[in-house]
Amino acid sequence: MLNIPICQPNESISNIRMADKSTQVEVQHETITRTALPAPWLGMQAWRIRNQVGESPVWDDDAERLLWIDVRAPAVLRLDPATGALTRWLLPEVVGALGLAGGGRVVLALKRRIALLDLASGELTGIATVQDEPPHNRLNEGKVSPGGRWFLFGSMDDRAGPKQPTGALYRAEANGTVTRLLEGLTTANGIAWSPDGQWLYFSDSHAGIVWRSPWNEALGQMGEAAVFATSGDEAGRPDGALIDLAGGYLSAGVSAGCLNQFNADGKLVHKLDLPLRAPTMPCLGGLGCSRLFITSLVRPAWTAPGEFDGALIEMDAPCRAKPAVRWRRAPIGLKLA
């Protein structure tokens, strides 16, 4: 079992305040091309985007576009794989996660606040601020829950040196209420749900552990967490992940340049080597979710990044999964859907 406290649903509500008013962000447009990769990566394609920390990819079925973030740029990016059209929304602060919302918006976990970005207008509207995070922490990782009611996100120790387990998991409602669900993580990551929505999966990339806990979608509550899988530096510490229709957990091995596939019992059944050193998160997209996209990062200590470090990788999907869900509950005075 996970030996860190699971908070009661009302413990952190008093520590949350509504965030600042709306701001306008700069939008940039360009066209890029993809590169077909040689052996041993036949069948893979790379979009040479050179993200500093590409993360949180999600496929927008309505727009037929892939969205993701560059944590350190910081920016939201959107790609049309059919044409190579790339759009960047330049953000005023570091961003840790992205999820789909209604009305042409995305929900973002910024450094310490949750915000909505209107992709058409470039308007960034704060919803809530997490006030009691340590000064060395930032928000990290996040996904919309299976029913669309909750935006689940985490936090992490963002210091360059030795890190401590000061991170947590939170749930957010679109009315501005944020509740801490769990404490004691160093780098919250790997959020995903089982196909039936009954189980929540999450990881601590620093510890190299993936946990699984019961999930109550109606109440936004998690039960006691148990270790699902472990994966260290050599095997690939667990970063972002997706769960396929068979209950398999596909985890980006951020320390080993690979995608690790665990079956529903937590056993490693396949390791896919990638043409880059630090993949960060996989997602399915394209027509019928038939394509697999994988984001990646470039570490500041790398004096000579490889050709595809920081790129977006695309290939045929090795599995099937449910499409991404939108955050559908609108805050007072703001229509999302």
Image: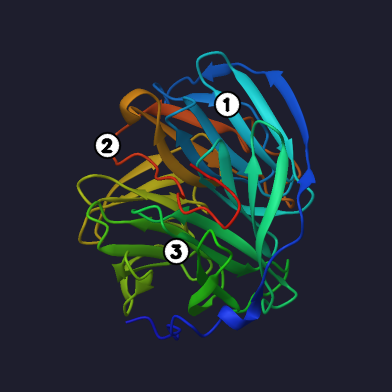
Say left or right for 261 vs 47: left
Helix, strand or loop at label 1? It is strand
Q: Nearer the viewer, mark 2 or mark 3?
A: 2
Name the element at disc 3: loop
Residue located 42% across and 30% down the image = 61
Q: Nearer the viewer, residue 307 or 180?
A: 180
Residue 79's label in the rendered image is 1
Q: Earlier in the sequence, mark 1 or mark 2?
A: 1
Answer few, some or many: residues within 10 Å of disc 3's Cα (few below 14, many 20 plus, some between 14 and 19): some
- Up the image or down, 242 lies above or below 83; here it is below
Residue occupying the point 56% across, 35% down:
104
User: In this picture, is 71 found above or below 177?
Assistant: above
Circle on res. 171: none
What residue is at 72 percent from the left and 41 percent from the top? 123
> Are the two marked residues, 2 and 3, in contact with CB atoms closer than 8 angstroms?
no
What residue is shown with label 3?
Answer: 232
Few, some or many C-alpha atoms within 10 Å of disc 2 (few <14, some 14-19, many ≥20)? some
> Which amino acid is tagged 1?
Leu
Q: Which residue is mark 2?
A: 319
Q: CA distance from mark 1 to mark 2?
A: 22 Å
Q: Quadrant location of the N terminus? A: bottom left
Mark 2 element type: loop
* C-alpha gap between disc 1 and disc 3: 32 Å
Instruction: Answer with the quarter of the image where residue 228 lies.
Output: bottom left
Tell me, yes or no, whether the two marked residues, 1 and 3, touch with CB atoms within 8 Å. no
Kind of residue indicated by mark 2: Cys
| Residue 205 picture location, percent across and down | 50, 63
**Quarter where residue 21 is shown:** bottom right
Q: Please tell me which of labels 1 and 3 falls first in the chain.
A: 1
Distance Cα–Cα, label 2 vs label 3: 24 Å
Please tell me whether mark 1 or mark 2 is closer to you in this view: 1
